[in-house]
Image (cartoon, coloured by chain):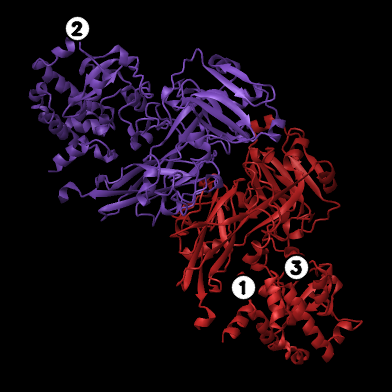
Chain colours: A purple, B red
Amino acid sequence: MLLLRRCHSLTRFGPLNTQRHQVTPAVASCAARLCSSSSSSEDHRSHQRVHSLSWKHALAGLLAGTGAVLAYGLHHQHKAERADTGVQTLKKSSSLPIFSQEEVTKHRSLEDGIWVTYKGGVYDITEFVAMHPGGDKIMLAAGGALEPFWALYAVHNQEHVLEILSDYKVGELNLEDLKKQQAVKSSDPYSSDPERHPVLHINSLKPFNAEPPPEILSDSYITPSAFFFKRNHLPVPQVDPASYQLHVEGLPGGALTLSLEDLKTRFPKHTITATLQCAGNRRSEMNKVKLVKGLNWGIAAISNATWSGARLRDVLLAAGYQPDVAQWARHVQFEGLDTDVTGTTYGASVPLNKAVSEEGDVLLAYEMNGEDIPPDHGFPVRVVVPGTVGARNVKWLGKIIVSAEESSSHWQQNDYKGFSPGTDWDTVDFKSAPAIQELPIQSAITTPADSATIDRSDGTLTVKGYAWSGGGREVVRVDVSLDGGKTWQAAQLRSGEKGQAPEPSPPPGRAWAWKLWEITAPLPPDAQELEIVCKAVDNSYNMQPDTVSPIWNLRGVLSNAWHRVKVKIRKDEEEE
Amino acid sequence: MLLLRRCHSLTRFGPLNTQRHQVTPAVASCAARLCSSSSSSEDHRSHQRVHSLSWKHALAGLLAGTGAVLAYGLHHQHKAERADTGVQTLKKSSSLPIFSQEEVTKHRSLEDGIWVTYKGGVYDITEFVAMHPGGDKIMLAAGGALEPFWALYAVHNQEHVLEILSDYKVGELNLEDLKKQQAVKSSDPYSSDPERHPVLHINSLKPFNAEPPPEILSDSYITPSAFFFKRNHLPVPQVDPASYQLHVEGLPGGALTLSLEDLKTRFPKHTITATLQCAGNRRSEMNKVKLVKGLNWGIAAISNATWSGARLRDVLLAAGYQPDVAQWARHVQFEGLDTDVTGTTYGASVPLNKAVSEEGDVLLAYEMNGEDIPPDHGFPVRVVVPGTVGARNVKWLGKIIVSAEESSSHWQQNDYKGFSPGTDWDTVDFKSAPAIQELPIQSAITTPADSATIDRSDGTLTVKGYAWSGGGREVVRVDVSLDGGKTWQAAQLRSGEKGQAPEPSPPPGRAWAWKLWEITAPLPPDAQELEIVCKAVDNSYNMQPDTVSPIWNLRGVLSNAWHRVKVKIRKDEEEE
């Protein structure tokens, strides 16, 4: 009975429980059950002997602190069995079939098979799922590319991992999909939107708005671009980098036009690590209080990346900016190349002093995580306004206007503003509130997931999450409570990849990147369920409000109350 | 019965109820009762006819929107009565008695008489109290000087007010007290501390720590210096402005020494309006959760003033500061001229980038509210670090040190830091938390006072208070609830003296001054008591935490939960 439940826990998709203590020796037995539920006919015979797997082998792998030994052993035993039964022939065929991405994406369950792609190859890893040392996290890759996950989990960068993978090759991805060239359906303005990784939870398809599974966020200080939350307001424009032009207007010297090459060569390349967050992150919690207008974001409309490009300050100086401009100008407006059916572009603005400050670090970025910015994130050039709400970080940047006025766009004037909980759509006056720029202190629990069931196991619980504040304010503490907020302990903060040296401490007011946090605390002895709560503090000692209701607002933005997660605790095995 | 209760309400000292709707025609009748309880023998006869005061007269004054007409009328009727009975002789005496401040201060109740001083004169205004158009607020001046109140309530700057006052003259203040020269008791390091206004609520006498009555704060956008909260860590040093020297150290050019004259003449004079707040403001609310170490501040360890002086930036540039200094220096330390018995000075530091920023507005201030800085506030020179906790605004500034390190002072290293509620004195590691610099969003209700009883009167309630945020973040909204936080309405904000044009909107990130707020809302029809709550929002959309307990910390700093005030509602007269 216990075994069956564990298997279920490993296979279910959606809110995945990634508690470390779930990786127990039981995973080996579980593997057998899982695989025997697979529907691919050739698999049936091969699984009979998995039960005979040496427990010593499994245990050795776990004690070594990595599941790799276990997985390798399981895999090789498995492989030998397959060779006996002639299953290997498919792989050895000289002409493997060609599959489309669409066909690959259909294979996302044990019933339909688990397919993934890697460097143009298509792999059916259904059998391997139960042997995967990283547990059920492998299911996140189902139907999509492995590369972003392997970038995230660097342990895969080993020869024997590729060796394991090669055994599961079933075909090639067609060239068209490999090049991510999409069929153009002229009637649909979204038809040229890029492919996205299937792991993303889609809040809106057109325009595309999606967030990664929360547990991915806290596994990597830098969010791989494929998993970085995506918030488009309009179709993704197709921009030819060779003919790209950026226009800078509103300065005494007249208009300046720059090519992508100009941006890359005429200005020093500046790199920052910065977290972007959608104003609507965690809106779903406000929806539970009372319905708001807006996409029902979970807790993952926030991500962290490195960004490289020219400083906006440098470009404005080149375009004729001088200090006396500040006597009449107050704002810098940005226009995107993304347009609606009337030809209106996306637009936003930021205060001039942020734009021109040496310490503001506003970038015209052409790289994200060391590569060209992907189409969904603003290829070839986007603005990165660190410390400022996502909506002002205009993508596919076409025009910069130095101005006495804020952007007149809908998104600056009649959206992305905060109101009193007492304000409704009948009484709201959008002019009465300032456009959101800097965001307030924020944190959330990424694991365990809400409603997860946790093993009592070694009597401790590990809780992970992220914390960030706007305006360059550094997160200095995250308090975690296991009793709904009655008692609190400070979590450990991390500002770099796990096991690596942390990034150097930023100067005051320039902490643009989040901190990941983690705490392992004793489980209360008799607790059957817990309400886990987190709240963060930044270096202005701003704290999150306790509850959602008093910060509720009709647009569902700025949802930064304490994050609460309820979990059940499974009794010890011997008690069942 | 009602009359008697009202009289009591007017005369009680301490938490004074200043709701505007208390100024009703009943005040006139009340006057009679009050005066007849006076203990001065010569008054007894003069009050018999007050009852005959024309109600038309009283009503005219109130309808005119000011109580001045009423007061003047009441006063003249009174005066005529006094003339009849020879009471005027005292005033007309050519040799009025000389009183000490100590004697004046003894007269702070209707029983002992209400005495005040004005420009060296001593006035017994016992009789006038009940006629005062401003209601019982006049009691705040009892035993002290009128000047700071009249600066606060400019309506007094009229000839007829002086005329009224002159009739109550009973003596002269002795010259010594007038010059505020204090007797020197060599054994007490605090013996040369200056005189303070008796209205201040003293939390500690040595060192002197005191706050004004809260309702004074919201009556004046600029807090008069006499009422500005005072937070000294050590005795007030006596500094001779003629020989004052400021030493600037740590820059490549070597040490620079400046006289007060140098500061005033060699650098442009820069003026800002800035609110200072003690880190311990509202600590008393944390004490109610669990006892903390620290002075039991109420809600008034915060005040707003104009400050003029040389920019620290300009002085550092004159002392040899160049951008490359920032490669090794991180902090600017300040040392006060106030010392403990071992000769150790008060000290603190701020981040270098705040100190040298053109937008940081850090001043070496020699004026407060347009006058020399008073001794309690740092005469002759103090640092004003706008947006930053009071403790870094070092008074009686003696030395500035540009440094790679923070100040090593107790107050920088082992005080003024925030911790998790779970941290106690056994587990605290002061190195684990950053020194408080910018403060978080704050607001409080100044009227009505907690536990006040409110007339149902016209069916509305006016609530007033202040709101401020650190780091130059502008307060953009204050929400007020009359039902303990269930429903909210946005209050009206004010950034200047009432009836005057507001100060011009500050550039982003330079909103150093608080906003005063006010809301008049209908009283719930059947409510017998209310829990009034306020919470503010700054332009980074940071909000105050809901409750005190989760932000409790062992030092009782950063107490910025929603402010809650419970009041009782008195039924309508006709219902009694």
Q: Would you identify the image quadrant in which residue A24 lies?
A: top left
- Which chain is mark 2 on? A
Q: Nearer the viewer, mark 1 or mark 2?
A: 1
Question: Could you tell me how far apart the alpha carbons at marks 1 and 3 are, in whole angstroms?
Answer: 38 Å
Report which residue position mark 1 lands on: B16
Question: Could you tell me how far apart the alpha carbons at marks 1 and 2 are, in whole angstroms?
Answer: 94 Å
Determine whether, in the image, residue B182 is placed left or right of residue B6.
Answer: right
Q: How many marks?
A: 3
Which amino acid type is shown beneath numbered disc 1?
Answer: Leu
- Are circles 1 and 3 on residues that touch, CB within 8 Å? no
User: Does A184 sit above or below residue B352?
Assistant: above
Determine whether, in the image, residue B429 is placed left or right of residue A531.
Answer: right
Q: Residues within 10 Å of mark 2 (few under 14, many from 20)?
A: few
Name the residue at 31% across, 43% down.
Answer: A448
Q: Would you identify the image quadrant in which residue B442 lies?
A: bottom right
Report which residue position mark 2 lands on: A94
Find residue A505 and report its horizontal and vertical position in percent. Answer: 53, 35
- Which chain is mark 1 on? B
Q: Nearer the viewer, residue A196 or A363?
A: A196
Q: Give the SS element for disc 2.
A: loop
- Which chain is mark 3 on? B
Report which residue position mark 3 lands on: B187
Q: Give the SS element for disc 1.
A: loop
Find residue B250 and report its horizontal and vertical position in percent. Answer: 72, 38
Q: State whether residue B568 appears in this view.
A: yes
- Are circles 1 and 2 on residues that touch, CB within 8 Å? no
